[in-house]
Amino acid sequence: MEHLSDYVLNIKNYLSEDICLEIIKSLDTISFHRHTYHNPSNENVTHNGNEELWICHNKNISISIIKRFSYAFRRYDMKIKSPYVNFSERTEKFWSEPRFNKYDVNTKMDEHVDHIHTLFDGKRKGIPILTLLGFLNDDYEGGNFYLCGKKMEVSAGQLLIFPSNFLYPHRVDPIIDGTRYSWVSWIW
C-alpha cells in the first residue's frame, strides 16, 4: 500500500435508510451534552463553547450498529491484508461503544486526530488504532467532512474506517442549516 487513502475503507449503505431514520428518531428523545477535548499532557479539558457539537452514548440505540461490526472488520481486513493484525478477530473487548454526535446550526468539530486516552478506564487498556465513523443523515447544509485535508463525499448510512493516528487528521465544518447526526467507535 502506497498512499494514506489505501488504509481508508468506505462502505456505502452500511446501515439502511430505515435504520438511520429509526436511530435519529430515538436520538431525538434523549439528552446530549457538549463534547470536550482532553489534553493528556496538562490534563486540561476544553471545548469551543456554543460551536462545539453535542454527544451521547446509548447502548439500546447502538445495537443495530454493533450487529454489523464483524462485517465491517472483515471488509477492512480484506482491503488492507495486514500480516500484523486481524481485525475480524476483534470482540467487544477491543472496541468502544458507539458515541452519537449531533451538530446543530453553527456547531462543528475542529481538526484533530483520534489518539484518545480517555476511552480507557483501567479495565480497558490501549489506544485506538482504527476509527469507525458512520453517517446517519444528509439532509443538512454545511457540515462537510474532511479527512487528511480532502473533502469526503458522505451520505446517510455510510461508514468510513481509517487509522486513528496522527496521519489521519479530520474535521467537520460548521452546520449552516439543519441538524447533522453521526456516530463513531474506536478499535484497539
Image (cartoon, rainbow, N blue to C red):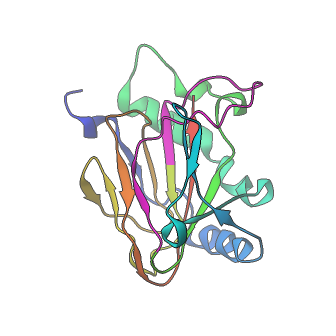
Q: Residue at x 41, y 42 (%)?
A: 113
Q: Is residue 94 positioned above or below 174 on the image?
A: above
Picture coordinates of residue 1 (x, y %)?
A: 24, 26
Q: Is residue 149 above or below residue 181?
A: above
Identify the residue shown where x is 59% and y is 58%. Answer: 35
Quadrant that contains the C terminus: top right
In front of the other: 179 or 117: 117
Q: In the image, is 149 to the left or to the right of 22? A: left
* Residue 55: x %, y % from top left: 63, 61
Is residue 34 toward the left or the right of residue 86 in the image? right
**Relative to the observer, which residue lies in front, 52 or 145?**
52
| Left-right relation of 164 to 57 | left
Spot occupied by residue 40 in the image (x, y as percentages of width and height): 55, 33
Q: What is the span of residues highlighted in magenta in the rendered image?
A: 107-132
The answer to if 178 sits in the magenta stretch is no
- Considering every residue shown, the one lying at the far top of the view is 83
Magenta: main secondary structure: loop
Residue sitting at the far left? 2
Which quadrant of the structure image shows residue 119? top right
Quadrant hosting residue 125: top right
